[in-house]
Image (spheres, helix red, strand yellow):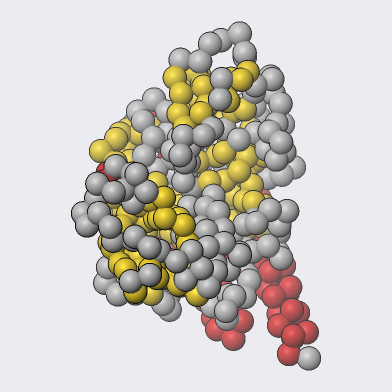
Amino acid sequence: MACRVALCYRTVMGKVLRCMALAVGMTVATVSAWAQADSYTVPIYVTGTQTPSNYQIYVSQSADGSNAVPYLFDTGSPNMFTVQGTNTAIAPTNTFAFGDGDPVYGYYVEGRSLSLTTKTSVPVTPVVSNFNTAMVVQINGNTVASNTPLADGTYGDFGAGFYGTSTLSTLLTAIPLGSNSRLGYVVNVAGISSGEGSLTIGLTQQTIDTLTNAPGAIQLHMNHSSDQIQGPEGRLITGYLKGVAVTTVTVDTANGPASADLATVFDTGGGPNGVIYYGNSSTPPGVFDGYLPNGSFSLTSTSGDSIESWTGSSPWGGSVAVIGNQAPSENRVNTGGYLFENYIVMYDLESAVLTLVPVPEPSTWALLACALAVVLPVASRRKRS
């Protein structure tokens, strides 16, 4: 009976809150001539076909927002590179790589009219005209057929593009906002079972106050990238390193627990493992020597707030992995995509603050849901133990 009640609770709350999200999106979409709103709510579609689950967002290249296609929403992507399979007669003028250097994408930069939409191509943000995007024409030197999706059914990654460049960053930073809003996002992934989450673009003071004062909220300071990236209406804004904040990571080794303060990537595209990138030239060089892949992994803020911990394996069946031979400037930890299943994540780009709000148990979720309903649509799921 308890299981049935919990299931019913999640189902009802999820439907109610998704309806609220749709209502807000429709209200925004019908504003005459796309008057600047304080925030926009875009669906994130959650698919459980992979582990961890895929988070998809839809992007249109049409002036009317039609013919939108899916991209993986990956907050760790370095740039806005949402156009997959373009004019192969144009040779790539630059490249960028992910992870350990594979794959390598060849691209040229071109201005396009871009907007974010629902899966059915209903626009939910204004069209940003002549926005620079990476037109990907090669992957590992191989030509990509025109307008052809990848094997996973998407057209590449849609990055939050925190650090970017002045000529290539992300659409999220360029969408015009009302005067009562701050630059920033809220990522709320509903979880595998619900199928839909939300991305809120633009932060009102009420949104910021509600989330920063929520029970168990953790605040971390993001690192500046020293880059200037494309902002609203063509102006440049300060970029950040993938939403990175410094945390203390601790793992089991053959010599006992070992800890280090490392830059941490809060990355929706993170895999099932807790990956620690740490070079032999670092100080101290051997802090993670003899790590135990199936030991324990914990992540805490530098002020002592517990963020995530595993014992034996990660919640998605992954393990702790330490990848060496990194330059000290590349030292970092990626906790994996599971973190977004347990937290609502807010990025305040003007204050350089990243806020994690634990998704509560059903017994207390209703109270937070009522407060959030006033400021942003959210999706419900029960936090895993």
Q: Is residue 151 above or below residue 89?
A: below
87 to the left or right of 282: right
| Residue furthest left as drawn | 283
Q: Is residue 128 above or below residue 19?
A: above
Residue 84: x %, y % from top left:
62, 27
Q: Is residue 321 visible?
A: yes
Q: How many marks?
A: 0
Query: What residue is at 24 percent from the left and 46 percent from the top?
Result: 281
| Residue furthest bottom as drawn | 1
Q: In the image shown, does 200 or 76 lie closer to the viewer? A: 76
Query: What residue is at 32 percent from the left and 37 percent from the top?
Result: 237
Residue 239: x %, y % from top left:
33, 41
Query: What residue is at 59 percent from the left and 86 percent from the top?
Result: 363
Q: On the rendered image, what quadrant is the N terminus found in? A: bottom right
Q: Is residue 35 above or below residue 334?
A: above
Residue 88, picture quadrant = top right
Q: Is residue 135 visible?
A: no
Q: In the image shown, does 186 or 342 lie closer to the viewer? A: 342
136 to the left or right of 3: left
Residue 3, picture quadrant = bottom right
Q: On the rendered image, what quadrant is the C terminus found in? A: bottom right
Query: What residue is at 61 percent from the left and 43 percent from the top?
Result: 72
